[in-house]
Image (cartoon, rainbow, N blue to C red):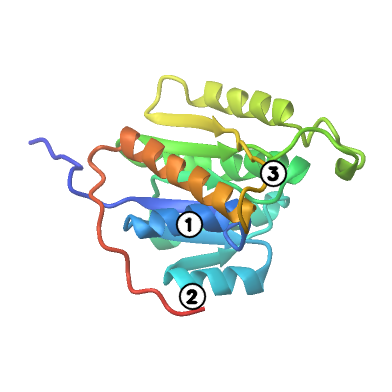
């Protein structure tokens, strides 16, 4: 007897969900009825985001191998599996290192799932700069893209896709341009995931609490 995995929802982990592009992605997926697991290194921002979106949250410092491993174990114990990982924590070399550590910790759990699964890596917003300190190349989009491609090679031939998304931030045309850019990028990521998961049935999101 065969079974299908149609008419199911989508479980999405978003790193760096307390603010910026991470929160924008969480909000966009919540608006489309996905089940969310948010994580961030800032407990206060994480709690506020989870309350606004009425969803699950767990603290995790993506720069810590131990922290990422503990997070992955907790997700397996509580949820069993998930469908999509959005790597959006930090910026510069923090984004790059966090992407690799979270993917390393969560990939074994992602392999246990079924259907098309995705790792979406949101590249740092800019190239090398003095703000990157001792790690200018590690914080560049070129370095991020190279490591994301290496991660994709590890999943080649499986049902797990790895996609690198590069922000295209433009000069201010209105107030809050960064938020507008984040929202547009987040919506494009939602559409990208929907194209890969046509069986994802969009459900009305849970009632949100006021911030």
In percent of the image, x 48 and y 75: which residue is there? Answer: 51
Q: Position of residue 46 (x, y in %)?
A: 59, 68
- SS for callout 3: helix
Q: Nearer the viewer, residue 96 or 61?
A: 96
In percent of the image, x 59 and y 55: which residue is there? Answer: 179
- SS for callout 1: helix
200 over 203 or under it: above or below:
above
**Sequence-wise, which precedes: disc 3 or disc 1?**
1
Which of the image's four quarters has the N terminus? Answer: top left
Task: Evaluate if marks 3 and 2 touch, with contact meaning CB atoms under 8 Å apart.
Answer: no
Task: Evaluate if marks 3 and 1 touch, with contact meaning CB atoms under 8 Å apart.
Answer: no
**Sequence-wise, which precedes: disc 3 or disc 2?**
2
Q: Nearer the viewer, residue 177 or 7?
A: 177
Around disc 3, counting alpha carbons within 10 Å, would you say few (fewer than 14), some (14 to 19), or many (20 or more)?
Answer: many
Instruction: Say which quarter of the image contains residue 19.
Output: bottom right
Q: Which residue is mark 3?
A: 95
Q: Give the Cα distance between marks 3 and 1.
A: 17 Å
Q: Give the Cα distance between marks 1 and 2.
A: 12 Å
Q: Position of residue 78 (x, y in %)?
A: 42, 63
210 over 176 or under it: above or below:
below
Q: Nearer the viewer, residue 181 or 76?
A: 181
In percent of the image, x 33 and y 74: which residue is there? Answer: 207
**Mark sitting on residue 105:** none
40 over 86 or under it: above or below:
below
Q: Which residue is mark 1?
A: 26
Around disc 2, counting alpha carbons within 10 Å, would you say few (fewer than 14), some (14 to 19), or many (20 or more)?
Answer: some
Q: Is residue 60 visible?
A: yes
Q: Which residue is mark 2?
A: 51
Around disc 1, counting alpha carbons within 10 Å, would you say few (fewer than 14), some (14 to 19), or many (20 or more)?
Answer: many
Q: Is residue 58 left or right of residue 170?
A: left
Q: Nearer the viewer, residue 169 or 116?
A: 169
């Amino acid at each position: 007897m065969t079974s299908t995995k149609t008419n199911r929802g989508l479980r999405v982990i978003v790193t760096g969900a307390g603010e910026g592009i991470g929160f924008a992605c969480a909000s966009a997926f919540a608006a489309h009825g996905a089940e969310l697991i948010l994580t961030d290194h800032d407990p206060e921002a994480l709690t506020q985001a989870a309350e606004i979106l009425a969803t699950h949250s767990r603290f995790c410092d993506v720069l810590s191998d131990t922290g990422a491993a503990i997070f992955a174990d907790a997700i397996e114990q509580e949820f069993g599996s998930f469908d999509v990982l959005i790597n959006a924590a930090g910026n510069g070399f923090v984004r790059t290192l966090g992407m690799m550590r979270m993917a390393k910790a969560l990939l074994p759990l992602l392999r246990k799932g079924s259907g098309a699964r995705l790792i979406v890596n949101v590249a740092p917003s800019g190239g090398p700069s003095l703000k990157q300190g001792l790690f200018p190349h590690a914080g560049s989009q070129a370095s991020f893209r190279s490591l994301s491609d290496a991660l994709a090679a590890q999943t080649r031939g499986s049902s797990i896709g790895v996609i690198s998304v590069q922000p295209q931030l433009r000069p201010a045309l209105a107030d809050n341009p960064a938020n507008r850019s984040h929202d547009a990028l987040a919506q494009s990521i939602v559409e990208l995931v929907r194209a890969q998961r046509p069986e994802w049935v969009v459900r009305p999101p849970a009632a949100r609490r006021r911030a």
